[in-house]
Image (cartoon, helix red, strand yellow):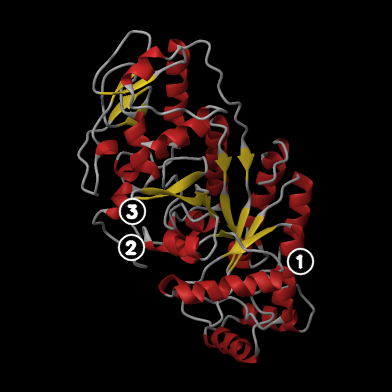
Amino acid sequence: MQYIVDFISKELFDKAITITTDAAYFKASDQPRLNYSAQEFSDGEFFLRSTHLLFETGIRPQHFECFEVNFYKAFYETSGDFPFDIFAASFYLLSRYEEYLPHAIDEYGRYAHINSLAHREHFLTQPLVNYWLQSFKKALEYKFPELIFKKAQFKCLLTYDIDMAWSYLNKGWLRTIGGFYNSIRKKEWARVKDRWLVLRGKRKDPFDCFEWLDAWHLYCRLKPHFFFLAAKKSGRYDKNNSCNKKPFRDLISYYAKTWHIGAHPSWQSGDDAALLKEELEWLEVVGEKKITHSRQHYIRFFMPVTYRRLIEAGIEKDFSMGYPTINGFRASVCSPFYWYDLQKEQATSLLIYPFCFMDANSLFEQKQNPQQTYNELVQYYERVKVCKGVFIPVWHNFILGTDPTFEGWRKMFELFMKETVYWDAYTDE
């Protein structure tokens, strides 16, 4: 109960909401009062008849029917001054309750989005919790016209996953020879020529778009977040440039001094807590700063094990809350929130920053072209902006580079930065 009240309090008010179970104290108070219980006391209070979820212990399948309120889906229908239990419904979505229940997994063993209530009830594309809070605010204003609400501000946090900083450079002779061999075997002569020219210094590496990105960040007055994959050993899913290469270390060092950097824990570290700590320590040495931000490689995380390991490793903010197979709001919210460990039934210090858009989802999963993706991107941006939330897109340097495979995506990004991002106020988070 305290957890969800704290979240709603942070979203709507500058001051914390006081919770009491003392009926006499509650009735005697001259402050605006919200009665969340099974019994209404007086007409002067805001009454919301409670449902069962927040008073339960343990994890079990929840049974409820979805219905519409102000053209948006809702559940845990109840009575009083609001048509549904916003506390229970918000807690269900934010805690990712459904991810603790038996569910189908995708080809990589991750929680599949098709399991989710948001997918089944067609509100995955909406920051539903924020929409509910807007309606809840209006209901509270109607009951208590003197209430003063928090003045929220929209923020845009650009984030990048650097899975592989360079396509051809800084790979080591073995991987370079292997790259030539694969291209020749597939008769990809243009790629053979491109690799040769890059290695001879006659052409820029197609994944190296870092200076170009820096120029856009300065133009739009934004400080982005870069998440670097730093697996010590190359694997099937971990193909970053070698941590022994000086240019890779120099790139991380430069960005640690210029922008925000974080860890992009490798696939291998997802099964090895000691390896996770090794990767974080290496980034801290190279970047000469404490690493407190992260986003899981391949968005591979499992409730509650992954988040517990991140907390133990010293991570304070995680940016993994989104789906790796479809764009949308995994937790149905566009505001940062603290992770709640449902098994231990306790709030934690890990602050979750949910993303709703990833270029790789649009390209590889949703099979969209740059124009379709641009329309989708702006739509998500505007939805978050209306809610005065935090818009977090995920970009990849290999898609925004000059590789002909991704022709048109670079121009789409430029259009988004110039026509949309630039016009909103500077923010640093």
Q: Mark 3: which amino acid?
A: Lys
State the image coordinates of residue 42 (x, y, percent, origin top left). Answer: 31, 9
Q: Amino acid at mark 1?
A: Tyr
The residue to which callout 2 is attached is 106
Residue at x 33% of width, y 41% of height:
92
Circle 2: residue type: Asp
Nearest to viewer (mark 2 / mark 1): 1
Decide if residue 408 is in sight here: no
Q: Tell me how far mark 2 sits from mark 1, CA to CA.
A: 37 Å
Looking at the image, tell me whether mark 1 or mark 3 is earlier in sequence order.
1
Give the residue at x 72% y 57%.
259
Q: Secondary structure at mark 1?
A: helix
Whether residue 89 sits left or right of residue 368 in the image: it is left
Dots 1, 3 in contact, CB < 8 A = no
Residue labelled with disc 3 = 344
Mark 1 — residue? 254
Q: For residue 132, which quarter of the picture? A: top left
Q: Residues within 10 Å of mark 2 (few under 14, many from 20)?
A: few
Compared to residue 263, the image places residue 420 above or below, namely above
* Disc 3 and disc 2 in contact, CB within 8 angstroms: no
Q: Is residue 419 above or below residue 84?
A: below
First of labels 3, 2 by sequence position = 2
- The foreground one among 125 and 410 is 125
Labels 1, 3: front one: 3
Tag 1: Cα neighbours inside 10 Å, few (<14), some, or many (≥20)? few
Where is residue 112? Give x, y as percent. 33, 57
Out of 360 and 148, give the one closest to the viewer.
148
Q: Is residue 33 left or right of residue 407?
A: left
Residue 234 position, x and y percent, is 53, 82
Task: Specify which label sits upstream in the sequence, 2 or 1.
Answer: 2
Element type where label 3 sits in the image:
loop
